[in-house]
Amino acid sequence: MSPSRDELLWMYENMVTSRRFEEAIAKIYFEGKTPVFNMANGTIPGEMHLSDGQEPVAVGVCAHLKEEDIVTATHRPHHQAIAKGVDLKRMAAEIFGKKTGLSGGRGGHMHIFDPDVNFACSGIIGQGMGPAAGAALSRVLQKKPGVAVAFIGEGAVNQGAFHETMNLAAVWKLPFICVIEDNAWGISVSKRESTAVERNDVRAAAYGVPGHYIEGNDPYKIYDIAGEAIARARAGEGPTLIEVETYRLAGHFMGDAEGYRPEGEKDGLFEADPIPKMRARLIADGDATEAALDEIETKSQARVDEAIAFARESDDPAPEDALTSVFA
């Protein structure tokens, strides 16, 4: 399964938009946090997890999804939110804790929720597995169209929620796809030190479902395998497990000194940055000109600038609304 030219340009545009968005967030995040770093201070308080480098996973999968399809993501969700069509202005406002945010500023960047495009994420490791499978079950019971995709990290595969959900999804043959973003590091613990198997796609055999491992952080390969898995789910043939080798170009969180990485590892990752690699391939394959890609990049930057301006200019929530829509 190969992406069309329009799909390739859509994928590139969303990868660039995600990267530009996170570059803007990274710069703003340190406002008010210097010279002494305190994550509680500044324009954007709290933790911040960036997905720079992992953009191919989001676009390769979401290129196949429709509005009725469901996505659950992790604490590192911006690339997937953008690829699924989450409102960029309202997402920026949510990250800034503003009244115009997706959840009125209550959720922050790890709890982005946009029911208009069926997207949600959680800061709890592996938490998206059950809700995604539940959404897939709801589609089956209501005889409605739609598949559910749960994005998780390779560390989350060692959580009980992963195994329980994969088992039930297989038993019930749910229209469910689990996509594992293997960036090799669970915070500061390497995959080889935490996981008994070298590749998590082999775990699919335990549930009697197809398993795939995609090397090289390649959006073309991800598009191909994800397309097969999603078509299989739509046809009522049950779930698929996909693990993608990807790269986290930033630390686990903003302020992470990354002392756990071997010397020289980051240099190699930046050399494999997927955005310039895709740009070069688009031009080499004749799918786009340099001018066309420059125009896409300009458009993406303008969109991000507009979203950031909207967030900055939005009002803070009223103190008396602190408990509105909060349920104990």
Image (cartoon, rainbow, N blue to C red):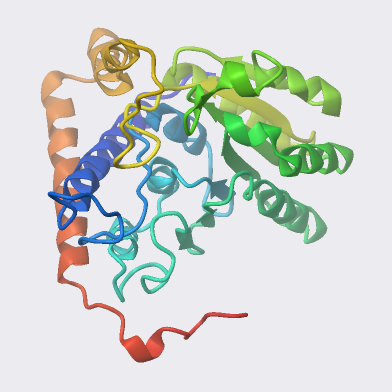
Give the position of the C terminus as an image quadrant.
Answer: bottom right
Give residue 242's quadrant in the image.
top right
Give residue 158's quadrant in the image.
top right
Residue 234 visible, this angle: no
Q: Position of residue 131 (x, y in %)?
A: 68, 54
Give the position of the N terminus as an image quadrant.
Answer: top right
Residue drawn where x is 44% and y is 23% of the image: 3
Residue drawn where x is 44% and y is 65% of the image: 107
Give residue 23's quadrant in the image.
top left
Q: Nearer the viewer, residue 306 or 92?
A: 92
Q: Is residue 203 above or below residue 45?
A: above
Residue drawn where x is 35% and y is 33% of the image: 251
Residue drawn where x is 39% and y is 19% of the image: 261
Q: Is residue 197 above or below residue 180?
A: above
Q: Is residue 43 left or right of residue 176?
A: left
Q: Nearer the viewer, residue 245 or 125?
A: 125
